[in-house]
Amino acid sequence: MDRPVLFDIDGTLVDSTQVVTTIWREVATRYGVDADPILKVCHGRRDEDVVPEFFSPDLVASVVREIADLELLQADLVEPIRGAASVLNSVTEGRWAVVTSGSRALMTARMRGAGLKIPTVFVAADDVSQGKPHPEGYLLAASQLGVDAMSCVVVEDSPAGVAAGKAAGAAVVALAGTHAPESLMTADVVIENLNELARAIKSLPA
């Protein structure tokens, strides 16, 4: 694949759904908060953007820190998404990046825990002032690759991520799994398996 590709990590390259769900439920229960509404919106977004929606202002900093600590402790309890390793081996070196709503430390650990290679361009929550669905992360990754975002393909699994890719002007391929296909229909293409990615990219307008 010669076209620049910008990948999300959680739910796209790394399967961390069980870990994320367990941690959010544990922390929410500790503070007497219902975890179900959180789990409906937290995937693909920064913890620091999600926590204020469900916890009182005086708790936000400690809850964000607690979630981050727990996630880092369990960073290696993840698996690669089926087809992730072969997809990353098929993209042209220096023409791909990752853009994640997690911290650099956590996402690097998860990538390594899943046995996946780490790209040169790695945009994490630490690097942006506005998380997905804002396009800042994808625009920054394209800039660091030295390309226009409109020439890129974004690969995402969440509605927030799809919205971020589209707002950046990129073509978006959505991987169904974390979310149902019908919630990802604003993407240019929806696939069920990463092994379909090369064909999906070829189907996109140049």
Image (tube, rainbow, N blue to C red):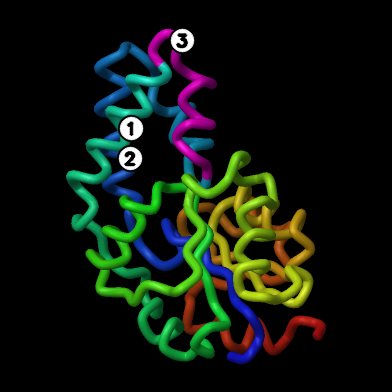
Q: Which residue range is magenta in the image? A: 45-59
| Residue 56: mark | 3
Q: Do the numbered discs 1 and 2 sit on residues whose CB atoms are within 8 Å?
A: yes
Q: In which quarter of the image is the N terminus?
A: bottom right
Q: Does the magenta stretch include residue 50?
A: yes
| Residue 191: mark | none
User: How far, Cα to Cα, is label 1 from label 2?
Assistant: 5 Å
**Which SS class for mark 3?**
loop
In the depicted structure, whether residue 94 falls above or below residue 126: below
**Which SS class for mark 1?**
helix
| Residue 24: mark | 1
Residue 123: x %, y % from top left: 51, 58
**Which SS class for mark 2?**
helix
> Which callout, 3 or 1, points at the residue further toward the start of the chain?
1
Disc 2 designates what residue?
Answer: 21
Residue 95: x %, y % from top left: 57, 82
In this picture, residue 104 sits left or right of residue 187: left
In this picture, residue 175 sits left or right of residue 72: right
In the depicted structure, whether residue 151 falls above or below residue 143: below
Q: Do the numbered discs 3 and 1 sit on residues whose CB atoms are within 8 Å?
A: no
Q: Amino acid under label 1?
A: Trp
Q: Which picture quadrant has residue 162?
A: bottom right
- Tell me which residue sits at (35%, 50%) in the image: 17
